[in-house]
């Protein structure tokens, strides 16, 4: 096992980011079995002694079905309405699922601005620190009901990297509907899996897409790549899975 993988395995404080496509059905509602499987893994990591911060996409996608919207809307007002409905459903689902392990969930809604402005940053840092000290699992999402640019560009991957900086994480896990980093679209023949990236030159030939295969998310592998670079620049190892 490489030194980087050892660091990930032994990390005592981790940030886990999960994409919309990993939590929702093709129709847009939450998939309870997928969410429970994620919570099972996070709870196991907590039981092993790690502190975990979960950055979760899925609010807009989770709000589509209850509102009778059949596909991700393009207009901002409908996106914000879906986020308003979906955020409540998402928080409730996480609270119930983590409750199976007697773990308390704390919801933290941020925009990218909250982790770059000094006063906002320090306030968020204190909140995370206290939640973790009290044994809670912070569940973070962008405040999509009022955010504008963040919704258009869908940068929860970037938010996760910034949160990893903010909480002093030892590792960042970026989870999506793709199992690893590839040098091209993994659905096409000939795409090669990249097992480990030690430096920028290792990804010079990577062609990363900008939207997930499900169409429900907004990030894609390009967003994962940018977030991984941001975290790695602060010495935080990143696992794509």
Image (cartoon, rainbow, N blue to C red):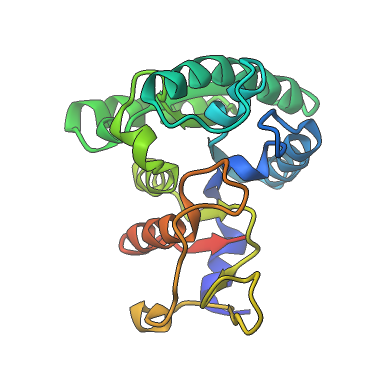
User: The C terminus appears in which quarter of the rendering?
Assistant: bottom right
Query: In this rendering, is residue 10 above or below 111?
Result: below
Which residue is at a point 55% across and 38% down the rendered structure image?
54
The residue under the point 53% across, 77% down is: 196
Residue 207, quarter of picture: bottom left
- In this rendering, does residue 132 appear at all? no
Taking the image as shown, residue 41 lies to the left or right of residue 241, namely: right
Q: Residue placed at 78% from the left, 29% from the top? A: 101
On the question of residue 144 being in view, the answer is yes
Q: Is residue 31 above or below residue 193?
A: above
For this view, does 198 lie left or right of residue 166?
Answer: right
Which quadrant holds residue 34? top right
Name which quarter of the figure residue 21 lies in: top right
Task: Classify residue 3 as left or right of residue 102.
Answer: left
Q: Residue 2 location in percent, x, y? A: 57, 79
Residue 222, image x, y percentages: 42, 60
What residue sits 37% from the left and 79% below the top? Answer: 199
């Amino acid at each position: 096992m490489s030194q980087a993988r050892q660091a990930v395995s032994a990390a005592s404080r981790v940030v886990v980011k999960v994409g919309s496509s990993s939590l929702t059905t093709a129709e847009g509602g939450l998939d309870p079995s997928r969410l429970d499987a994620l919570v099972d893994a996070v709870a196991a990591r907590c039981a092993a002694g790690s502190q975990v911060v979960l950055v979760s996409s899925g609010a807009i996608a989770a709000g589509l079905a209850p509102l009778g919207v059949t596909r991700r809307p393009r207009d901002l007002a409908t996106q914000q309405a879906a986020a308003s409905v979906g955020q409540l459903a998402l928080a409730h689902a996480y609270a119930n699922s983590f409750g199976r392990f007697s773990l308390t969930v704390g919801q933290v809604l941020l925009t990218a601005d909250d982790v770059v402005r000094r006063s906002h940053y320090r306030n968020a840092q204190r909140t995370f620190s206290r939640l973790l000290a009290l044994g809670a699992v912070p569940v973070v999402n962008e405040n999509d009901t009022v955010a504008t640019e963040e919704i258009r560009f869908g940068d929860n991957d970037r938010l996760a990297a910034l949160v990893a900086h903010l909480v002093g994480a030892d590792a960042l896990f970026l989870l999506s509907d793709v199992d690893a980093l590839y040098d091209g679209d993994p659905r096409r023949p000939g795409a090669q899996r990249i097992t480990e990236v030690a430096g920028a030159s290792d990804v010079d030939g990577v062609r990363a897409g900008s939207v997930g295969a499900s169409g429900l998310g907004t990030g894609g592998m390009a967003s994962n790549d940018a977030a991984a670079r941001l975290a790695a620049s602060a010495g935080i190892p990143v696992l794509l899975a």
